[in-house]
Amino acid sequence: MAEIQEPAIGAIAYKETYKEITENKFVAVAQQPVTTFSADVDRASYANVRRMIGYGQLPPADAVRIEEMVNYFDYDYPAPEEGATSPLRVSSELAPAPWNPKNLLLRIGLQAKHIDLAKAPSSNIVFLIDVSGSMYSSNKLPLLKSSFKLLLTQLKPTDRVAIVTYASGTRVALSSTPVKDKEKIINVLDGLEAEGSTSGSRGIQLAYKEAERNFIKGGNNRIILATDGDFNVGINNPKDLEKFIEEKRESGIYMSVLGFGMGNYRDDMAETIADKGNGNYAYIDDITEAKKVLVNEFAGTLFAVAKDVKLQLEFNPKYVKEYKLIGYENRMLANEDFTEDKKDAGEIGAGHTVTALYELVPADGKTSQSFRYQTQVLNEKGNGNELGFLKIRYKDPKVKDAKSVEITEPLVFHKKELKDTSVDFRFAASVAEFGILLRNNSNKAQASYGQVVELANGAIGRDEEGYRKEFVRLVKSAELLAK
């Protein structure tokens, strides 16, 4: 676990904690042609990095999760066709890596199906709110209240909301109430005050009890924890917390996390809770980010269409000598975990896109034998033009004890010039390159802030909310801080 020391404010020095990230290395296809990882639609890292740069400091390497930075942005990937049996659709693109043109960059994109919110299942939501003394500042509890009020505008009148709070003690501040009584819910939110220590464990336990008490069969049952992650009473060890949340997630109640604040922020704790609770994790640094997560991406934040989503890719040694997954270090799985249904993996919400990027060292003409791509298989099935073979497994989130469904997708070797790729490919590549620079990764090669800006500027595309233009400004600020 990594810690960063914030500048002293008054007489108090603040600390933030992040899980340590060990950078993925290049892997030889001849020795290990198969790679397996869990899907990730969390976006917290990007907003958190933006907050730090906005305050005039570059983030510590362990705060930079490149996959979350890339997945912060939406991409125009082809959606599942009407009547498709799978809620996910795969697309891919291949071109030279901008920071190392000798290598290739493979983009794998998943697009989750959209849902008609008018026909969405009823929601039973518990707002689990940290009201401890550490939540006093304006970018914590006050921002939290405003964020939840935005969420209320998106819920149906028949949906139900309860409020559980925790500090030195825990309480049900509001029992489950229909959203049509919005003023009653808002009055309780407005009356919350920050004081006391942080008994996070008891708060989580009480929230599950409240969610179970009002459980809607076939509905959307979810706890949304809003916190700075600083649990200083009760469970404060991520391993203990993992075990508790893992025991509870089988109930059909998801646990999502909204992180707030700075100084004593516990990113490692917030990430653990969301990952193990089959939920998603976002960091709210201002009201605009709250609108993005809780209004613009409402369906994806609240309604899962696939859970325990795992990806497994086998590379063809005819085309690939070595490969490296960019990011996803905390999501890597053993290859045998792919078919193990008890192994937890990521949740994908309605309308979400998931992007994974691999940097590839092209083959040098010396092929070797491997699973799918043995000589006899190539001859029999004509798979010689395949770059790789992708398998995806997922479960239906609406079915208790669901078995995984597997879909497969051959990835054809079709290399484009970088200038001929889609704006989404180029923009995702620019975000990845920015993450590589912030982390000072070993494969940064010719990466530069100037190149990131140039690449991103040429790939703004349709940017109705201005997120991509904001990214360019962020990169320019980081470049100034790096000098």
Image (tube, grey):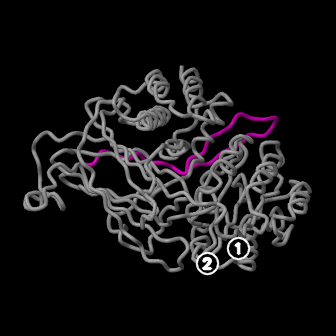
- Hey, what amino acid is under mark 1? Tyr
| Disc 1: CA contacts within 10 A as few (<14), some (14-19) or many (>=20) | many
1 and 2 marks in contact (CB < 8 Å): yes
Q: In which quarter of the image is residue 235?
A: bottom right
Left or right of 107 on screen, residue 309: right
The C terminus appears in which quarter of the rendering?
A: top right
Q: For label 2, count other residues whose C-alpha is less than 10 Å away and answer few (under 14), some (14-19) or many (20+).
A: some
Which element carries disc 1, helix, strand or loop?
Answer: helix
Q: Residue 437, relative to residue 206: is it above or below?
A: above
Q: Name the residue under label 1.
A: 208
Q: Is the magenta stretch mostly helix, strand or loop?
A: loop
Whether residue 310 is situated above or below residue 141 in the rendered picture: below
Of all residues, the one furthest to the front in this rendering is: 82
The Cα–Cα distance between marks 1 and 2, rounded to whole angstroms, is: 9 Å
- State the residue at coordinates (43%, 58%): 81
Q: Give the range drawn in magenta.
A: 1-28
Query: Would you name the residue on which mark 2 appears?
Result: 251
Query: In the shown orientation, is residue 168 left or right of residue 62?
Result: right
Q: Earlier in the sequence, mark 1 or mark 2?
A: 1
